[in-house]
Amino acid sequence: MFSIDRSGTAKPLGRQILTISLMMLVLLYLTSGVPKLVAQDQSAPAASGQKQEAPPEAGGPQNDVGPYAIPKKKEEPPPPPPPAKPKKVEGMPDYSIKADVSLVNVDVLVTTKDGQFIPGLKKDNFRVMEDGVQQSVVDFDISQAPITAVLLVEFASTNYYFMVDALNASYAFANALKKNDWVAVISYDMKPHILADFTQDKQAVYGALNQVRIPGFAETNLFDALYDTLDRVDQIEGRKYVILVTTGVDTFSKLTLDQITKKIKATHDVTIFPISVGFAVRNYCETHRCGYTHGMGIPVGEMDYLQGDNEMNTFARLTGGRAYFPRFQAELPQIFHDVIGDIRNQYNLAYHPTNPKLDGSYRKLKVEVIAPDGGQLKVKDQKGKDVKYNVVAREGYTAKHTVD
């Protein structure tokens, strides 16, 4: 076969193919020693196809060309050995000891005969007796903190003058409050009605009292209302006070006097200050024989009111408070001034009872004010005259009860 070049001369085709083949062989030989632009990875597999072994310090998962260069985690030290168990002593039973030490708090009010607070007393000036056994006072201070109180007001369709006195007494108490005091307002007739939950807003207290305008039922279920109030405040920590504005007459309660008395004894950190209302009307009816009706023609005699007065004195005495029986409306501001003063100026004592039993028993308390030498403490006024004083504290408390 021949090929024709540009000059028109015919050349053999086989010689041309041989020349091209020789040129390609020379080109392949020359290019075999040229370096590549991308350097080879040292961890790449060898030409023989075997995978290169990973260095001992490398870790992590494997890939196509070897392991990822992730250092191995350092070996964590072994956990410390468990503490050695105490050696068992022969003859000793297996049991654990749990100590439950009770702390009893007692608020004490020391005033003159006129109701003025006596300051400056120390821990050594108080002697606390529980069931006739002297206790060691471990904590002592004077409280002047904000108060937490419930204003429990009797408001029923009974007597117009009783209702007016109850409202006047309630407003007088609200006027004596400070901005940091917490107060709730509850009225009651046949059942209690929460007019305002605990608030520090004095205007909210006034607003709650403004709702008490139209009386409902004629019954005054004092025992039921007081029980319900004590049950509610028992869930609140700290010292609480119940300002009870009432005639003292209970007409239709489901509870008895004995039941409410037990509830008062079992409730901790609550002091009751009863304020009697309608005293002027009662005195007038004693001399004019006008008779009493407790609404809807329910007859109430003088004996019922005297019994109510005795109950209010009992409630106050059991909780460390005082009962007041104002004869005129003008006495109310001074009475509530004294009540607030009693609340804000109290001596707080605490002790661990020598009787550690948690048996739910009622234990009687007696608090005495003594001189440092153990004798009778003498208090003098500014003129150097001896002043008689009163010590007011709760009569006892109910111990906690545990079930084995």
Image (spheres, grey):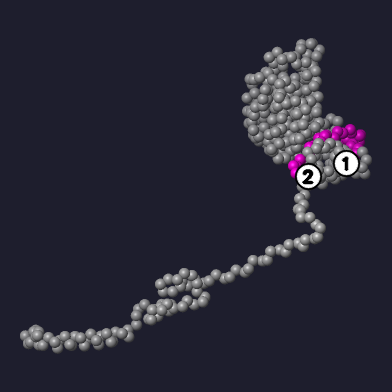
Residue 196 falls in image quadrant: top right
**Residue visible at 62% across and 69% down in the picture:** 77
Quadrant containing the N terminus in the rendered view: bottom left
Q: Position of residue 39 (x, y in %)?
A: 38, 79
Q: Nearer the viewer, residue 219 or 389?
A: 219
Magenta segment main secondary structure = loop
Q: Earlier in the sequence, mark 2 or mark 1?
A: 2
Q: Is residue 264 left or right of residue 55?
A: right
Which residue ends up furthest to the left in the rendered image?
A: 8
Residue 166: image x %, image y %?
71, 23
Check if residue 401 falls in the magenta segment: yes
Amino acid type of the residue that numbered disc 2 sits on in the rendered structure:
Ser
Q: Find disc 2 in the rendering and name its residue.
A: 102
Q: Is residue 17 left or right of residue 277?
A: left
Q: Taking 276 as reference, is 62 above or below it?
A: below
> What's the residue at 67%, 25% (across, down)?
191
Q: Residues within 10 Å of mark 2 (few under 14, many from 20)?
A: some
Give 44 or 381, whichever is nearer the viewer.
Answer: 44
Helix, strand or loop at disc 2? Answer: loop
Residue found at x 80% / y 28%: 314
Query: Which kind of residue does numbered mark 1 sit on?
Result: Val
Percent coordinates x, y for residue 99 in the rendering: 77, 49
* Residue span colored magenta: 377-404
The residue lying at 34 percent from left, 82 percent from top is 35
Report the disc number at residue 133. Answer: 1
